[in-house]
Amino acid sequence: MLNTLEDILVILACVSGSLLCIWLLQRFWPSSQRRTHNDIIGWQVSVLGTTYAVIIGFMLYAVWTSFQSAEMNANDEANCLVNVFRLADGLPAMQRVAVHQLAREYANIVIDEEWPAMSKREWILSGHETIEKLWAVTMRVKPETFAEQSSMNLILSELSSMTQHRRVRELESHSNLPTILWMVMIFGGAVTTLSSCLFGSENLKLHVVQVTALTLVLSFILVAIADIDRPFQGTVHVLPQGFERARATFAQVPPEAP
């Protein structure tokens, strides 16, 4: 995982490498000698560029889809927590107070403890313990009316969904693209950039500008993929907005004495 400064340094390093490549080519193989091979270099760059563009486009789409999925899953987990909190109003007083208290506790743990831990690719068990307590409290309910039975069943359904969303969030916080795919993208970018440097141009300054622009775009895309690839780390990451809204919802209900 790279921070913003490291992202900028990577982009600058890629651009500097492409400029160094042009300088070395000019020194050992001047553009006047390369110009006669422009027709061969041209179709080679065209094929490489098209193939690499398809690969990069697919990877960018894949990581962005995963990012949106992680964001939606986190919001669904928060929605389940709010539903548990509201459905507890149909339980007996003792269990209702306990569920409300545990729901508030879970929201605080996720926002204040789990999200900072996930940004470091770590995982804590406090939230899991709170969910276990929610299950235990709900299972101890002895419904005496149809309304209490319905509330209990609905809470168990929401708890089941919330537990599933939590497990998915744990997996997503540690997921990333396989190394082989990164090798393909980095190697493909290097080959494409090198091929563009081989052109023999009469206007060296224009050639330098074009190669710099190409390198800048490719390196920026790779950095963006690396950043979005880990949805809970990096400059662009999933925020606990769903749980913050849930905590705001809970704050509207005055806590009851146990």
Image (cartoon, rainbow, N blue to C red):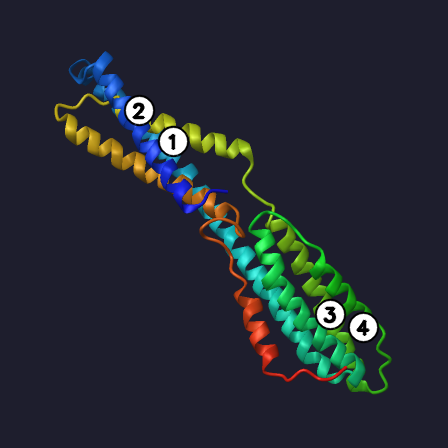
Residue 195: mark in rendering: 2
Q: Which residue is mark 3?
A: 157
Mark in the foreground, 1 or 4? 4
Please say if 167 is above or below 96.
Answer: above
Residue nearer the viewer, 14 or 111: 111
**4 sits to left or right of 214:** right
Marks 3/4: CA–CA distance: 14 Å
SS for callout 4: helix
Q: Which residue is mark 4?
A: 137
The kind of residue on which mark 2 rests is Ser
Residue nearer the viewer, 41 or 23: 23
Q: Which residue is mark 1?
A: 189
Considering only order in the chain, which callout, 2 or 1, is on the residue closer to the N terminus? 1
The image quarter containing residue 107 is: bottom right
Residue 150 location (% of width, % of height): 77, 80
The kind of residue on which mark 3 rests is Ser
